[in-house]
Amino acid sequence: MKASSVLALGLPVLTYGRLEFAGHRGGMSGHESFVPEHSKAAYALGASYGATFIEPDVISTKDGILMVMHGNELGRTSDISERPEFADRETTKTIDDGDGSGSSTITGWFSEDFTWEEISTLRLRSTLYDGKGPLDNIYGFLKFEEMMAYVSELSDMVGTTTFGVYPETKLSNYFASVGLPLEDKFMQAIANAGYCGYGAGSSFCRASLAAEGLGPIVLQSFCPESLVLLKNMTDLPTVSLINGGDDGIAKLSKDGETVDADLVALIATYADILALPTSFDEDFFADAVTAAQTTGMVVHAWVADDDAGLYSRLTDLGVEATFTNNMAYGKGALDMMELMEGQQAKGRSSV
C-alpha cells in the first residue's frame, strides 16, 4: 500500500478552530510510533489526524541538494549502518547545534558527506524497532521540493483541507561553516513551489505573488542569523524557535528569571512568531507569551502531545499553534480538553 493511500481509506481529517497543530517531523513519529519520521507515511498520517501544518527540517547534501530530516546524522533514521559501501564514511564530528546551546560531538554518517544520488539509495526506519518496524525499509529520504509537492498532493486528495508547510533551516550556522549555506536555496525552493514570487528584476520573494491554491507557509529557525537573512529575502512570516535550556532563557531574560521586554522586542525585529518550549516554567512561559504579544508577535509552542491540561493552558494564554510529535495523541488530548470545558460550561449553566 502506498503511503498516499492512507487518506483515501477514509481516516478522519480533523481541524480545530481554537488551536492549530504543526505535525512535528511529520506528526506521526513520536510517542514510540512505528512510523519513520519525515517519511511520506508520517506526513500522510499526521495530516489525516488533524495537522494544520506539516513541519520539515531542511538540511543539505554534499552536492547542495536540500533534503528533509531532523538533523544531519543519517544513521539514526536510516539503514546506512548496514550498507558496506558506506562503512568507511563513518566519522566523528562536532556540530554547532545552532540554537545557542553550544556544540555536540556525534559519531555517524552525515548528509554533507554524501551526494543526493547516494542518499537516495537509503531506506528510512523508525527510531525504535532496530530496522524491523512495519514501515521500516520502505520509504526513502525526500528532497525539500518533493516534500512540499507531497503536502500539496495531500491537500488535493483530501479536498476539504489545504495543509500548510512549516519548514526549518536546520543547523544553518553549521552548514554555512562547511560551505553549504541553506538560505538562498531554501528560498528558491519555496518560490519554485509557488509560496512566493519574484517581481521583474527583484530578488525579494513576495507572498503577494504566490500561486493560488496553496496552503500557508511559515519559515522557522533556532538561528537568529538565518532569520535575519530570510527577512532580507522575503516577506513570508518567520518564526524564532527558542530552545528549552538556559541558553533559550537567556534569549528572553537578562537575569535568568524575569522576561525582559527589550530582549523580546529584539527578536521581533527578525521574527513574526515566537515559538516557546512547553518545558519552560509555567510563569516564565506565560510572561514570555505576554511580552511577545505586546510586540505584535504571534506565539506558538513546542511540543505538546497527550496532556489535555497543557492544551487548555496554551489556549487560555492565546497561543495560536503547537507542534505535536503524534497527531493521534494530540487529537485525543484536545478532544479531552474540549469535553472537560463543555462539561464545566454545562455545570455553570445549570446553577
Image: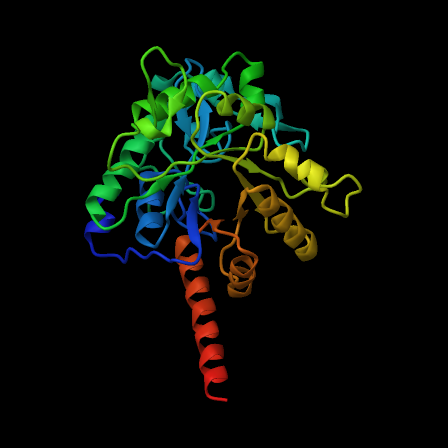
Q: Is residue 265 visible?
A: yes
- Please, which colouring scheme is shown? rainbow
Residue 248 or residue 86, whichever sits in front: 248
27 horizontally vs 298: left or right: left
| Residue 171 % position (x, y) | 55, 26
Instruction: Count how many numbered circles sit on residues in the image.
Output: 0
Q: Is residue 121 visible?
A: no
| Residue 41 % position (x, y) | 32, 43
Q: Is residue 2 above or below residue 308?
A: above
Which corner quadrant of the image does residue 222 belong to?
A: top right
Q: Which residue is pictured at 73% across the width and 42% down the height? A: 260
On the rendered image, what quadrant is the N terminus found in?
top left
Q: Which residue is pictured at 64% across the width and 54% down the height? A: 286
Q: Is residue 120 above or below residue 28?
A: above
Q: Spot the residue most to the right.
A: 255
Q: Is residue 219 above or below residue 27?
A: above
Q: Which residue is pictured at 64% across the width and 44% down the height? A: 244
Residue 181 or residue 300, whichever sits in front: 300
| Residue 120 % position (x, y) | 34, 24
Q: Which residue is pictured at 24% across the width and 34% down the height? A: 212
| Residue 125 % position (x, y) | 40, 39
Residue 34 or residue 287, whichever sits in front: 287
